[in-house]
Image (cartoon, rainbow, N blue to C red):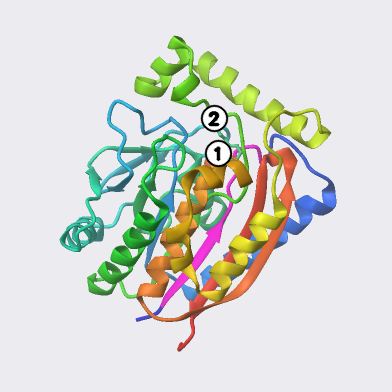
Amino acid sequence: MPVAVCALSHSPLIGFNHPAKAVEKRVEMAFDQARSFIAEFDPNLVVLFAPDHYNGFFYDMMPQFCIGTHATALGDYNTPAGELSVAKSARTMAKDVLAAGIDIAVSERMYVDHGFSQPLQILFDGLDKVPVVPIFINSVATPLCPVGRIRQLGTAVGHASAHIAEQRVLFLGSGGLSHDPPVPQLENATEEVAARLIDGRNPTPEERARRQARVIASGLELAAGTSSMRPINPEWDRQFLDLISAGELQHVDAWDNAWFAEQAGNSSHEVRTWIAAYAAMAARGNYVINYRFYEPVPEWVAGFAVTTAVSADA
Ligand SMILES: O=C(O)CCc1cccc(O)c1O
Ligand SMILES: [Fe+2]
């Protein structure tokens, strides 16, 4: 029963802000590489680990992780809107993960943003091209659970994936690496911003456009060196990729949440999606990373990485 991994950064600023031509070309080649890897692997199920950015999940009921048994993409930035083709196995997997002692939330009406829709669009050319089990991982709404819990979640999902109908499972992680986009924080929010973090569903098109314009502008400022946001940290990113490559995921259990933000920006917690995907893979046996791409892209506010992995004993 073959399993594989693809993990990649996302940025909703792709297509809005343009880094140097050569950079865009290298990223496009990395996407090509990932697409041909996936086409060859030919998954009949994708388990997609991704975060949210106060579009689908809010503080009125914020789970640390949630499996969607039905999911709809909102279509923020230029990503497609519509339903994902959620596999029936989502229910089986929720049951198995809970039985393993991981208290995952379940949603029959999961709303997801570019964190989920962008990798599906880039890698599969649409939201409904492949059966998917969508798993949300809180990566911005503090307080966050210890990162070791995410490794355990991934491990439980990996074990559960061995007991479903689909035989060729791709674990897909979406997010990271180091980056610090202007996502508001509840702790120091104005009343107006707090209200939108607590229960900000269905903003008006004007509100959404204003927010997106602010994030787009922040990318240009970061690239121009006129930003107060934390810079991308290529050294932190390299160490993270080295750790994943070495299969030494257990080290993340010692990582302190505050340390992530200090070293690599508040949104670096999105690497939780990578940790879950690779832990799921590790639960199915040793793996080897057969493709690794990295490039810091300030215009997109992203330490941009793409990796793929196969079973070592395949
Ligand atoms: O719209 C938002 O709130 C944040 C958007 C955003 C920007 C850069 C990198 C990301 O990973 C990301 O999600
Ligand atoms: Fe993100």
* Quarter of the picture holding the N terminus: bottom left
Q: Residues within 10 Å of mark 1 (few under 14, many from 20)?
A: many
In magenta, the rendered stretch is: 3-14
All told, the count of numbered labels is 2
Spatial CA span between label 2 and label 1? 8 Å
Callouts 2 and 1 close, C-beta under 8 Å: yes
| Relative image position of residue 81 (x, y in whole percent) | 45, 36
Can residue 152 be seen from the camera position used here?
A: yes
| Mark 2 C-beta closer than 8 Å to ligand 1 | yes
Ligand 1's image quarter is top right
- Residue 131's label in the rendered image is none
Q: Is residue 20 left or right of residue 216?
A: right
Which residue has dot 2 on it?
Answer: 183
As shown in the figure, which amino acid type bears the numbered disc 2?
Answer: Val
At mark 2, the secondary structure is loop
Q: Is residue 162 left or right of residue 280?
A: left
Q: For marks 2 and 1, give the one nearer the viewer.
A: 1
On the image, the x and y values in percent for residue 181 come to 61, 34
Query: Residue 266 got which mark?
Result: 1
* Magenta highlight on residue 84: no
Query: Could you tell me which residue is drawn at 45 percent across and 89 percent down?
Result: 313
